[in-house]
Amino acid sequence: MPNPAKVAMVAALEREVSRLVKRWNKVERDHEGRRFRFFENGRVVVVCGGIGAEAARRATEAVFALYQPKLMLSVGFAGALDPTLKVGDIFAPSRVVDARDGSRTEMATGHGVLVSAAVVAGVEAKKKLAESYSAQAVDMEAAAVARGAQARGVGFMAVKAISDESDFHMPAMDRFIDERGHFKTGRFAIFSAVRPWLWPQVIQLARNGAKASRALCTELERYIQEPEKSEVSGPELRPISKEVS
């Protein structure tokens, strides 16, 4: 049984946090018939559970069962809904909204609203999400992690780096995400290779991801080095009202 962790971070993909965890202890553990890769560093653990709410839920359940953390962070990339947010900006919201059912999680720290969507949001979807939830950014996992933390009465925070701006036209991504939340990089590369009109977007997406990862890992390293910044109250989950301030 691994040692309990003070802080657990749930990311979607390893490439989001690779700079942070490259020298950490890497272990693979099983939970409910699934294998998860954990990165351990003292009282901090990171798990990369996959893309989407279900993958994030499974990873959250696993890290709670195996490490009993006192604080949960949903970390990784987010898309900007607010045009003033640029690639590499860090967004730590005070509210996370689940677009699937309208529930919301309020935090004692942070500013703004992050909405968790069921699919990768394109330009038009971003506009609708911004209008519907008064949100500044969108991801796919934070609400699921928040729900798991709320169920156990432990603290929750979301720390996201902007990887695509509000007017960035995303290539078709959802079809390359499997049922486990894994992104099929090889298939996407083949798909893109025979569609040269997508090359500028794909190249820009890779550059954006590298910049966002650097910014995110720098911010998370600061959190680890300043643990007093991570002392927050437990999240509160409740139905969302018609108007979001």
Image (cartoon, rainbow, N blue to C red):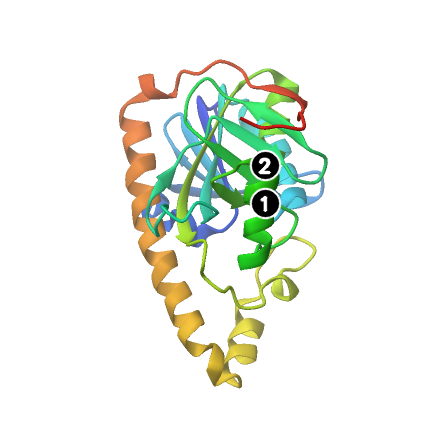
Residue 193, above or below 78: below
Q: Amino acid at mark 2?
A: Tyr
Describe the element under mark 1 as helix, strand or loop.
helix
Residue at left offset 60%, top offset 48%: 128
Horizontal placement of 100 versus 94: left or right?
right
Q: Quadrant of the N terminus?
A: top right
Q: Relative to the observer, which residue lies in front, 190 or 92?
A: 92
Distance Cα–Cα, label 1 vs label 2: 6 Å
Describe the element under mark 2 as helix, strand or loop.
helix
Which residue is denoted by mark 2 in the rendering?
133
Q: Quadrant of residue 241?
A: top right
Density class for disc 1 (Cα within 10 Å; few <14, some 14-19, many ≥20) is many
Horizontal placement of 112 versus 125: left or right?
left
Q: Amino acid at mark 1?
A: Leu
How many marks the image carries: the answer is: 2
Q: Is residue 141 visible?
A: no
Density class for disc 2 (Cα within 10 Å; few <14, some 14-19, many ≥20) is many
Is mark 1 in CB contact (under 8 Å) with mark 2? Answer: yes
Residue at left offset 66%, top offset 60%: 178
Residue 122, above or below 157: below
Q: Is residue 191 visible?
A: yes
Give residue 129's mark: 1
Residue at left offset 57%, top offset 54%: 121
Q: Position of residue 45 (x, y in %)?
A: 44, 33
Q: Position of residue 185 (x, y in %)?
A: 53, 68
Q: Relative to the observer, which residue lies in front, 127 or 58?
A: 127
Residue at left offset 45%, top offset 61%: 168
